[in-house]
Amino acid sequence: MKDEFLKILYDRGYSHAHYLPEVDSTNRALRTMAEEQAPQGTVVFAKKQTAGYGRFGRPFFSPEGSGLYFSLLLRPQEEFDPAKVTITAAVAVAEAVEQVLGLSLSVKWVNDLYFNGKKVAGILAQGATDESGRLAYCILGIGLNVYQPTQGFGALSAIADALLEEAPQETVLATLGATILDRFFALYQKDFSACLPLYRSRLFLLGKGVTVVQGETRFQGQVAGVDDLGALLVETARGLQAFGSGEIALEDYR
Ligand code: BTN
């Protein structure tokens, strides 16, 4: 199974792909490889994560063989903006899911993908600096709930779901992974402005009343869009505000 999965990745040009049956977190495993000078394009897939995590250190449920859990190493030459990398990855995942599975996803700013009103994927981009404070590399982690785990989503089932009821063939999973990588690199090589309309067209909650949470502070308003830097635009009582960080509170649209 591992060999079949990797063969498809290698055949598609991802010669630095790894597949682990189990790991705490692919982001952590890849960080170790990055410190040992692994090249850009190194990608670690896992069948299961025992301690997968997302933004704000929250756990990311990653049961055996139900999803695509992987991390990609980037070594940006210039600036690194985690929001831009996250947005690019969100478009790549949505387009790959459409191409391979024929399903249409929406994006909840900034890093979540939704299908039928529930979260099916999360993205986490983390930068690391060298001793002089310069960016050394970026780890882009993607978790996509492809099919229903045998034990279900438990307490998460109100907010999380999978794309498919039944497990697809391993070749379909590998093809989906390779297609996400293809789409990501195609967009990543272009100017960010090429990606923005694709992201905006999938925006979930446009025009809806939401609460934006930034640490302890909450802002209420209506989602007006995403600006040219990828910040969320919200029409608040104080006028139009751009949020470069934070997240939309879930309770608003559950
Ligand atoms: C989020 O929902 O806030 C982001 C979730 C990111 C999960 C992926 S799964 C692969 C990689 N390894 C991790 O530990 N996290 C990311």
Image: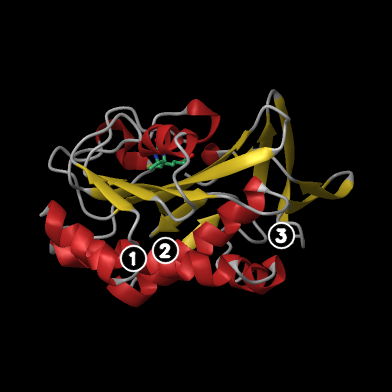
The residue at the far right in this view is 238
Residue at point 48%, 33% (across, down): 35
Does label 2 or label 3 sit earlier along the sequence? 2
Query: Residue 181 got which mark?
Result: 2
Q: Are marks 1 and 2 in contact (CB under 8 Å)?
A: yes
Query: Which residue in the structure is indicated by mark 3?
Result: 226
Horizontal side of residue 211 vs 182, given as left or right: right
Identified by mark 2, the residue type is Leu
Q: Position of residue 96 (x, y in %)?
A: 39, 69
Q: Residue at x 27, y 33 (%)?
A: 23
Local secondary structure at mark 3? strand
Crowding around mark 2 (Cα neighbors within 10 Å: few <14, some 14 to 19, many 20+) is many
Q: Quadrant of ligand 1?
A: top left
- Between the residue at mark 3 and the residue at mark 1, the CA separation in whole angstroms equals 28 Å
* Foreground of the two, 63 or 181: 181
Q: Quadrant of residue 36?
A: top left
Name of the residue lying farthest toward the top: 216
Is any atom of residue 160 visible in this view?
yes
Image check: 150 left or right of 102?
left
Which residue is pictured at 51% across the width and 59% down the height? 90
Q: Position of residue 37 (x, y in %)?
A: 48, 40
Give whichever of 203, 141 is nearer the camera: 141
Residue 38, labelled with which disc?
none
Task: Name the side, left or right, on which 25 lies relative to 228.
Answer: left
Q: CA distance from mark 2 to mark 3?
A: 24 Å
Query: Would you name the residue on which mark 1 appears?
Result: 178
Q: What is the residue that sits farthest to the front in this orientation?
A: 37
Q: Nearer the viewer, residue 98 or 33?
A: 33
Q: Is residue 154 above or below residue 17?
A: above
* Callout in the foreground (3, 1): 1
